[in-house]
Image (tube, rainbow, N blue to C red):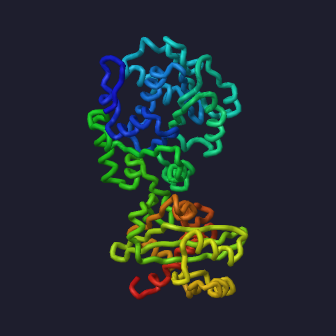
Amino acid sequence: MPRTNIEGVRLTDLIAPAFYPVYWDVKDGLHTYYDLYGGRGSTKSSFISLMLVMGIMEDPSSNAAVFRKVASTIGTSVYEQVLWAINALGVDELWKTTTNPYKATYKPTGQVILFRGLDKAKKLKSIKVAKGYIKFLWFEELDEFAGEEEIRSVQQSILRGGPCYTVFKSFNPPISRSNWANKYVLKPHRGAYRHKSCYLDVPVDWLGQQFIDDAEDLKQTNYRAYQHEYLGDAVGTGGEVFDNLEIRVLSDSEISTFDNIFMGIDWGWYPDPFHWSKMHYDGNRKILYIYDEMRCWKTSNAETWNRLVMQHGVTSQDLITADSAEKKSVGDYRDYGSLCRPAIKGPDSRRYSYKWLQSLKKIVIDPIRCPYSAQEFPEYEYERNEQDEIISGYPDGNDHGIDAVRYAMERYYKRKGQ
């Protein structure tokens, strides 16, 4: 369990059990980046503020910088949260806090927690501390920032001159799966610890009965809104073509059990890419697993086939269903020894294939092995008219991975009754 050297303080009264693993990971210095996201009442911001205050008190060379996109929101959000942490730890007399500018100073050493808005990002170069270095960063409401490039720029400006760093990023996932922050936490990063939480992970008496009642009421009256607001799920705007996706890493042992294998190719050169996908279909449970892919540009047919053989283990015995629009490419692959056949397609095949994919219980995509598919499927939305009303047609473009999957699974969705 978490512990503190502050007399009379029990961290188990301040940190929810769901955050114990994160606490020990931070204490042991196992990661640099901690991406904490989830629904209302998850106490992620409370946890981060506690870690900042305790971290500075335990490391005399450390300081912290806390960011909101808009400076005017600091006083009623992150600043108040840090004041709460100082009070909860019972160390008010050891800290001096000011609002002009917003700053918290640890009196015994002069270490500081600085608060900044990124309305004018160029001012970041002026951030200086009198003692030590800025070890801790906290980006609150991550989705409000301009994107990864803006965050990366801040980190590059500040994370220098010290032996180790701890960077917290926190947010409630926006409803759209295509929001950059939602995509960011799905993108593999070896130096990041990702943690999702919601109010169900927190002791009921911490939140109060009214909070619980409001959550349960929304659950009964508008479950989609409940999923988004309280569970922290990016449920989508209603325009997503695929609402049956599960983006997660597949283990080697899980993949070793796959036996009903399919492969598909969408031909391309430039700007459209060549895309090959490999998948396993569990017909009994109606679950499709997409677990390997290759995408490239300006690459000859001979070279793509060589890469598939050498890098992805494709053999001449593997059936590949490819876009029939390029008969020469299909012929080239057959000349190389590939068991490649053209997709049959036919009238309404596009619509039927999409409906079949939508009818599946689940489409599981490994974001490490298949980063393009993991981005393409969640972002693919129905077209809209000038009144922003959804049109039932499927847009053409940014769907190369989807097309490869459609071609591969043609044998299934063309069967009677599918």
Task: Please say whether residue 43 is visible from this viewpoint.
Answer: yes
Where does the C terminus fall, quadrant-wise?
bottom left
Quarter of image, res 18? top left
Image coordinates of residue 139 in percent, x first then y, are: 54, 36
* Residue under the image location 48 percent in, 79 percent down: 409
From the viewer's side, name the closer residue of 54 and 199.
Answer: 54
Taking the image as shown, residue 382 lies to the left or right of residue 413, namely right
Quarter of image, res 399? bottom right
Image coordinates of residue 88 in percent, x first then y, are: 37, 22
118, above or below 321, in the image: above
Taking the image as shown, residue 124 lies to the left or right of residue 114, namely right
Image coordinates of residue 148 in percent, x first then y, are: 61, 45
From the viewer's side, name the closer residue of 138 and 379.
Answer: 138
Q: Residue furthest front?
A: 310
Task: Please say whether residue 325 is visible from this viewpoint.
Answer: no
Image coordinates of residue 255 in percent, x first then y, are: 42, 67
* Residue under the image location 46 percent in, 53 percent down: 234
Quarter of image, res 102? top right
